[in-house]
């Protein structure tokens, strides 16, 4: 069974959630010779990464390959003091029009260092007002990330259909309530997506975020 779909949008960044990058860590663009590292980044072990490599390659070809120069400019790696990638995230113009947050991930073993917050603080904090609203797609298993997104000002989209995908928010909320702390769950907010956003997505038969 496919993972449930959740969608969030942010119309205004909560600047109080921003933090600084810890000493020894940097953000830089993914290099062309590091594409295989990026494709493996979302997965916590080599076996799973290998199993999903065809999917990641297919996704790259569908969404990024025709704009590969832009991809390698936008796709960012969070690196340790040895310049080794330990995380990734980036802003992408989905369907040439919609500002989206893509592939947010910090490698297992680094989650408790608040590096995800620092990485997103740099990325989201560098945007202008004209870049908003920002959209993202996530799943209930990413409940820690959902808490982080909520801190930055993202709200759950409540519309039943978003592009080609059904929005599973109603069925997933009870699961999130069990996974998240009471305080984090009660701080979640909800919003209907703009009509022009939903209309734009309805013209496409594939997903770009």
Image: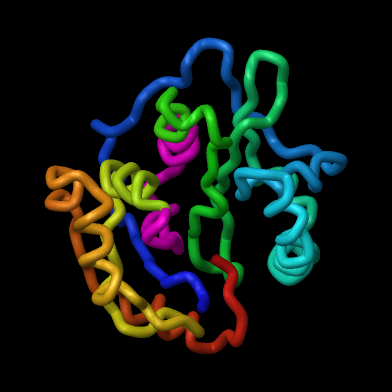
**Residue displayed at 44% across by 23% down:** 113
**Residue displayed at 61% across by 49% down:** 42
Q: Is residue 156 above or below residue 77?
A: below
Q: Which residues are magenta?
A: 118-141
* One can see residue 197 in this view: yes
Q: Position of residue 65 (x, y in %)?
A: 79, 63
Determine whether, in the image, residue 201 is placed left or right of residue 84: left
Quadrant that contains the C terminus: bottom right
Q: How many numbered marks, from 0 up?
A: 0
Q: Residue 125 versus residue 128: which sits nearer the camera? A: 125
Q: Is residue 114 above or below residue 101?
A: above
Determine whether, in the image, residue 20 is placed left or right of residue 104: left
**Residue displayed at 60% across by 87% down:** 205
Residue 191 within the magenta-colored segment of the rendering: no
**Residue displayed at 26% across by 59% down:** 176
Q: Position of residue 48 (x, y in %)?
A: 68, 54
- Residue extending furthest toward the right: 33
- Residue extending furthest toward the top: 23
Q: Is residue 159 above or below residue 104?
A: below
Q: Position of residue 26 (x, y in %)?
A: 60, 22
Q: Residue 196's image quarter?
A: bottom left
Determine whether, in the image, residue 9 is placed left or right of residue 35: left
Q: Residue 181's image quarter?
A: top left
Q: Position of residue 188 (x, y in %)?
A: 19, 54
* One can see residue 67 in this view: no
Q: How is the image coloured?
A: rainbow
Residue 122 within the magenta-colored segment of the rendering: yes
């Amino acid at each position: 069974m496919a993972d449930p779909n959740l969608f969030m949008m942010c119309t205004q960044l909560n600047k109080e959630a921003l933090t600084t990058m810890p000493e020894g860590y940097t953000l830089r663009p993914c290099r062309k010779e590091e594409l295989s590292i990026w494709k493996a980044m979302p997965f916590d072990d080599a076996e799973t990464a290998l199993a999903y490599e065809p999917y990641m390659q297919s996704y790259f070809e569908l969404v990024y390959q025709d704009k590969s120069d832009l991809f390698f400019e936008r796709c960012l790696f969070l690196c340790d003091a040895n310049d080794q990638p330990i995380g990734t995230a980036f802003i992408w113009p989905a369907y040439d029009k919609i500002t989206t947050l893509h592939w947010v991930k910090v490698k297992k073993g680094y989650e408790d260092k608040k590096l995800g917050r620092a990485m997103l603080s740099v990325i989201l904090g560098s945007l202008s007002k004209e870049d908003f609203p920002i959209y993202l797609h996530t799943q209930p298993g990413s409940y820690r990330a959902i808490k982080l997104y909520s801190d930055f000002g993202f709200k759950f989209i409540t519309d039943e259909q978003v592009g080609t995908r059904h929005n599973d928010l109603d069925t997933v909320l009870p699961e999130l309530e069990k996974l998240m702390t009471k305080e984090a769950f009660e701080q979640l907010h909800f919003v209907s997506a703009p009509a022009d956003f939903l209309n734009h997505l309805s013209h496409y038969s594939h997903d770009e975020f």
